[in-house]
Image (tube, coloured by chain):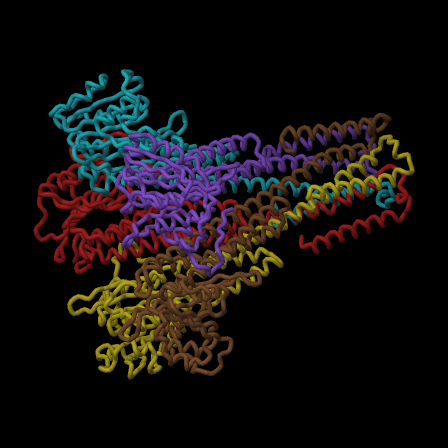
Chain colours: A brown, B yellow, C red, D cyan, E purple
Amino acid sequence: MPRVTMPPPGTAAGIEADELPTPSSDLGRFTVTCVDYSPAQVEVHDVTDLDDFLTHHRPAWCSVRWIDIVGLSQMDVIRAFAVKYQLHPLAVEDVLRTVERPKSEDFPGSGDQPGRLFVVARAIDQRDGRLHSEQVSMFLGRTTLLTFQAVQRSDTEPIRQRIRTAGSRLRENDASFLLYSLLDGIVDRYFPLLEAYSERLEDLEEELLDRPSQETLQQIHAIKRELMLLRRAAWPMRELVANLQRDKHECLSETSQTYLRDVYDHCGQIIDLIETYREVANAIAETYISVVSNRTNDVVKVLTIIGTIFIPLTFLAGVYGMNMPIPENQSALAYPVFWAACIALSGGMLLWFRHRGWL
Amino acid sequence: MPRVTMPPPGTAAGIEADELPTPSSDLGRFTVTCVDYSPAQVEVHDVTDLDDFLTHHRPAWCSVRWIDIVGLSQMDVIRAFAVKYQLHPLAVEDVLRTVERPKSEDFPGSGDQPGRLFVVARAIDQRDGRLHSEQVSMFLGRTTLLTFQAVQRSDTEPIRQRIRTAGSRLRENDASFLLYSLLDGIVDRYFPLLEAYSERLEDLEEELLDRPSQETLQQIHAIKRELMLLRRAAWPMRELVANLQRDKHECLSETSQTYLRDVYDHCGQIIDLIETYREVANAIAETYISVVSNRTNDVVKVLTIIGTIFIPLTFLAGVYGMNMPIPENQSALAYPVFWAACIALSGGMLLWFRHRGWL
Amino acid sequence: MPRVTMPPPGTAAGIEADELPTPSSDLGRFTVTCVDYSPAQVEVHDVTDLDDFLTHHRPAWCSVRWIDIVGLSQMDVIRAFAVKYQLHPLAVEDVLRTVERPKSEDFPGSGDQPGRLFVVARAIDQRDGRLHSEQVSMFLGRTTLLTFQAVQRSDTEPIRQRIRTAGSRLRENDASFLLYSLLDGIVDRYFPLLEAYSERLEDLEEELLDRPSQETLQQIHAIKRELMLLRRAAWPMRELVANLQRDKHECLSETSQTYLRDVYDHCGQIIDLIETYREVANAIAETYISVVSNRTNDVVKVLTIIGTIFIPLTFLAGVYGMNMPIPENQSALAYPVFWAACIALSGGMLLWFRHRGWL
Amino acid sequence: MPRVTMPPPGTAAGIEADELPTPSSDLGRFTVTCVDYSPAQVEVHDVTDLDDFLTHHRPAWCSVRWIDIVGLSQMDVIRAFAVKYQLHPLAVEDVLRTVERPKSEDFPGSGDQPGRLFVVARAIDQRDGRLHSEQVSMFLGRTTLLTFQAVQRSDTEPIRQRIRTAGSRLRENDASFLLYSLLDGIVDRYFPLLEAYSERLEDLEEELLDRPSQETLQQIHAIKRELMLLRRAAWPMRELVANLQRDKHECLSETSQTYLRDVYDHCGQIIDLIETYREVANAIAETYISVVSNRTNDVVKVLTIIGTIFIPLTFLAGVYGMNMPIPENQSALAYPVFWAACIALSGGMLLWFRHRGWL
Amino acid sequence: MPRVTMPPPGTAAGIEADELPTPSSDLGRFTVTCVDYSPAQVEVHDVTDLDDFLTHHRPAWCSVRWIDIVGLSQMDVIRAFAVKYQLHPLAVEDVLRTVERPKSEDFPGSGDQPGRLFVVARAIDQRDGRLHSEQVSMFLGRTTLLTFQAVQRSDTEPIRQRIRTAGSRLRENDASFLLYSLLDGIVDRYFPLLEAYSERLEDLEEELLDRPSQETLQQIHAIKRELMLLRRAAWPMRELVANLQRDKHECLSETSQTYLRDVYDHCGQIIDLIETYREVANAIAETYISVVSNRTNDVVKVLTIIGTIFIPLTFLAGVYGMNMPIPENQSALAYPVFWAACIALSGGMLLWFRHRGWL
């Protein structure tokens, strides 16, 4: 169940860089990776001495610098970057909250401060059979991309690999193309997940017709709920990508926007698939209910018919068990006649039931 | 159940300042607090002598004056402020009605009368286990903010505290930033409330699978209804904040609008959460119904089967209780054979039921 | 059930003034009231000699003339006004049809014919426990307002009273402010009606939990249907007021448009309340169904259990009533043992049922 | 069930005039009526010699020429008009398909070919108790109106009558006013149909509460389906009229657009009525289901209670019918005591059931 | 169930021509057909020597060249065309993915590279009783159309036929008219499919009222699901055609856009039909459920009544079977009186049931 925990109402919004705790030397579960590249050259190094890193300028040959910060618990590191890159306090708060809806915000530059595009994306993931969604916060400048995320995600590695490959489109393009590539990776994570859902739904449908059980229904309900969560995650991602692809921004190159159109198409397909699967899940749940209620109806109908046939016969047997003087009881033929009558009566009732279409 | 009581149809709308009853000296449950501040200085004082207060000008150092009027029963006080600040009669009526939808209205200045932005917000609150929503009416001028509310709310205190703190963003900024801060406080009140709902829903879901009862369902219905009311309150708040954040107004600074964007994001998250919880509540209610109807079906099915097995046996017993000459009744073996037949018959029926999947 | 009766398809639309029957002297249930006023002076008189009235010019001091025509059966009167004020044939037809949707139409002036705004509103009313909606047709010129309605409605009297009050806002303003005041009166009629619904719904809800009956449900259905009709009436009223408040028109003053904004807010609140009550009514109906079906389930379950316990016991009694040689029947202990067995059996079944959660 | 049959996929769209079969002399079930009129004069004549008709020019006094072609099976006639009036091949195809959605298309003129407005409307009709919808295709030029329809509809006669009436608005106006009049006639056909539905719904509602039967429900389903079809027909008619009334076109006069606004209002009322009737039909269907399920519940409950009361008594009778030594059976008082016990037991159970609210 | 399989997240999007495998001589299940035509001349030839084909220029008389590539497995062929016509990597990827939503994308020309319009359409088809949808990717230049598709579809043959026909509109027009013709063929494929659905639905409806069975319901569910898939395919086709018909593009002639308006109308009709059939299918499913539940109710009611009548009679018989001294048992009249009482009792109950309306 998604939840949002906020500071108590009335506290100031936004986090100024100097409100973050002062630097400490502990880098803990924190990794800062700096990737500098240009069409000709590439250099990847893990930052271990943060002060040293921040005071040095980037190499002259470098056309794009990507600083990837993984782990959000070391406030001093965040503080150092917020000061260095003059990040807006509201954006810093959003980075740390990690429950933001996907969105893009433009913080236009003024004077010596360069303009930045702040992008919040949500990457979806399935761990231990449960859906997780991780926030990825990105600050895009003209030649720099800062990414903040809580945990290392597996889909950044292929992107680094593509950066290392000389001549790749990623290597030839600017920082906004890197932003595009990261978003593309995040969005494409939906596809294998959805494929898994489509398989589970097909299995459930088969199971349903064979042997419908209460658990089947509960699994369908679970899938419906997860698809609902996926949809809630996918819609704002589409909005985000639509904005990025459509609106001009000084930091977004035209090439990147052409490629973002492709991501936008993928978002559309994802939402289409989610909607289709939701409708399929609904249809399966409906079928389940009609199958089960049909079966129960059949059971009850047949049992009621059996009962109904025997109740009049029992009455008849009761009559001849009465202790009053009954003429029939004197006859030796009474017994076989009784049985014959019983058989005739029940046979007649069965025929009548069949005639009425109740059997 | 929300209700709106209005004066009888046909009475004039709007309340002119001089239509309000004349001043009396009784300030009753009425508190007027005046907060003057500038980046350098701050002064908070409760107004006790209203006439004296209204005739004096604000101190020269003061860059923002916030007059917070709590309690709406003293018409003479409202009248005094309406006259002093030339409030529009329609706005005065809205202040006193306290059932308005959240909205912002621009009363543009003309000649000597300065332009004002009139903002009506609704603060949500839970008292005695029931939802309440309080109207907060605000008049924003260039350097003045007037706030009217019926009761003292707890989230204004942290804001005063932030004003008292030298160097806080609130202190450094203008009156529209104060308006933003109050709206931020009002909107953030939704989050703890929603967290409580999410906990209750999780508890109910667990309870449901363990021991479904009619009360569980009624609690779910109650939550659905409260969420419906929350949604009805949250949507126009979002519209209000969207308007404030988007439309230029002489009294709204650019900084405040940047920060209002943050409040707008929170409104979006709140509506997202409400929708999610509503869907979850619906899903729980559906599950409840399917669990209960499944259980009833099971009960009825099993009981019907028990009945059905014994009815033919009872018929058989009735047959041999008849007082007619029955050959079998002469044999000493009849009794054990009868029992054997009964056991065989009921066993056969049980097997058949199992074979048909009815057990 | 709302119905619209039209002339047969193919007949010409619109009614030219000279197509109306020629004047007769019978003024029947027809009242024409003329109210002339200016900030300084006011004069109200019932028109009895129509020809005389129409040939005379208005007094020079008069800034607004309001002619209120009540009763639509005297075609000659309508004709006289249509000729005098050059009303458009389509508008005349709409006045007489009285089943129009609320709307405003601009008939721009040309040459000597002044421009007019034609406004159709629907006033809602409850008579004899049933909802009625009356059409009020208004022609607004620069200094004249013509209103046509079928019956005298109670909410025009307070407005005349306000005109008679020297210094009232209504008296100080122009003809469009009178139009606004009439619309305000019409819209505010919804509030007491809605308050009555909210009370009935609360009563029904209480009744439902105490002693649910078929009539309760039918009352809820009736309320839902009436709310549906109210909604169908309220939506176009909101559209109408939205248009009037937003679009510039030569006959609408800026002050009137500011006040119409207030009417627009009321329309919004009315629609909000209607939607809320509809959802509440739906929720009550759902609760009713779940309460009733729960109760039926409980009844059927308990009765089935009682039946099920006795059926095996009856079988047992039947066995020992058989006329075959049964060893147990020889023993004097058989009877008490039989009872003990019966009690044990039924007790065991009850325990088992409770263990399974069926009781 | 609506169906659309098309030529096989891949065949060319549009029908060039010379693709239509060559002229033959057989005019069959085809009628071509030519109405020439001006304010001063009118002439109606049935065209029998088509070639002669097409080669002659219209009389000089004629301000509007209306050619009404009824019957679409004579391809040579269509061809002759298509050639003469240079109709666009796509429009000709639409005329012949007769399953088009209502729409208006502008074929702008070029060089010697005058611009034309092509309008497709659907007239609704009820024949043999079933709904039919006929396509009416109209080509509007500056002074000419061509109408194509498959069958003679009854609502064109009153329009011809109005043309014959000297001084009628229709006679005084241009060709677009004739178009308006035809559309008005088509739209007004909905009202008597809807009135019939409202009567049927009221009858059904009454019938429902008196003696609900399966047929009642099926009739309600039938009405819902017909209303659905009506709605599907009415919506695009409204769109069509909205476009005509709003967009400027060289062939549409301002007067006609003012009158089309009236048709647009009628379309709005029709859609309102349809929606209301649909909701009413739904409400009736819901009430039916709740009435029937209530009745079934009552039946089953009462019958179950009767059964439940007698089952324990039968057990008791069975006990005293056992052939084992039973002390009570020796007493002469046993029989009256047994009856008393039975009466007490059943009375007690009835009281308990009533106490539990089951009766 | 629709599925989309993508390369693993993080891999680069788009396929550069030189990333495709190098040419091989195997042309396999691949067919490349080149159609050159002008109003005067036409030439169709299958390309067997690809290199030769690509190095030669088109004949001078040729005004439109259509290259139709069927089969997407030969990467080297795709590569050759991608290089020759400078296709954008993202478009090449979309061609090969074959799961794209219908869309049109403009790749504007720059320098020596001509502008192209990239169109993805989905053709619907029914093979082996299952719905298939095939992607058709088209690159439109000023005088060239490239089409890529996985399998040969039957609706391209009539189009080639029309090209071969001298004087056909297709032959007279430019490349965009060819694009229109292909889209028209694709869209018109929906009509025969929908006609089949309408027949199946009518059959099912009839079957339902005669002999409702579980399979009927499952068939209805299947149709509903297929219609859902059709709708998902038809909506984006309509969007695509709407865009093409509305937006100006250097490669789209005005004539083609006029004709595309016709395709757009067809799309509207298709969606209308789909929605209607879906509603009809829903209505049939609802009727099914009400018919079945009515029938079950009837069965259960009648059987319960039979049971209920005999249970008291059985009790009575049980009473007179008791072995206690019963005075009635001494009388010879007891037996006929007993039968009379039974008949009276059951007759009375039947009358009462009928009086209550339960029979």
Q: Position of residue B285 (x, y in %)?
A: 54, 54
Viewer-proximal residue among C46 and A241: A241
Q: Position of residue D64 (x, y in %)?
A: 17, 28
Viewer-proximal residue among E76 and D190: E76
Q: Is residue A7 visible?
A: no
Quarter of the rendering containing residue E44 = top left
The residue depicted at 84 percent of the width and 33 percent of the height is B323
Q: In which quarter of the image is the C terminus of chain E?
A: top right
Asked whether, in this view, residue C331 is left or right of residue B96, the answer is right
Viewer-proximal residue among D165 and C206: D165
Viewer-proximal residue among E128 and B74: E128
Furthest-top residue in this view: D25
Asked whether, in this view, residue C119 is left or right of residue B279, the answer is left
The residue depicted at 15 percent of the width and 67 percent of the height is B111
**Is residue B267 placed above or below D329 in the rendered structure?**
below
Q: What is the tally of numbered marks visible in this picture?
A: 0
Q: Can residue D81 be seen in this view?
A: yes
Q: Where is residue D151 in the image (x, y as percent from the top left)?
A: 32, 24
Quarter of the rendering containing residue D198 = top left
Asked whether, in this view, residue D198 is left or right of residue D338, the answer is left
Q: Where is residue C235 in the image (x, y as percent from the top left)?
A: 33, 49
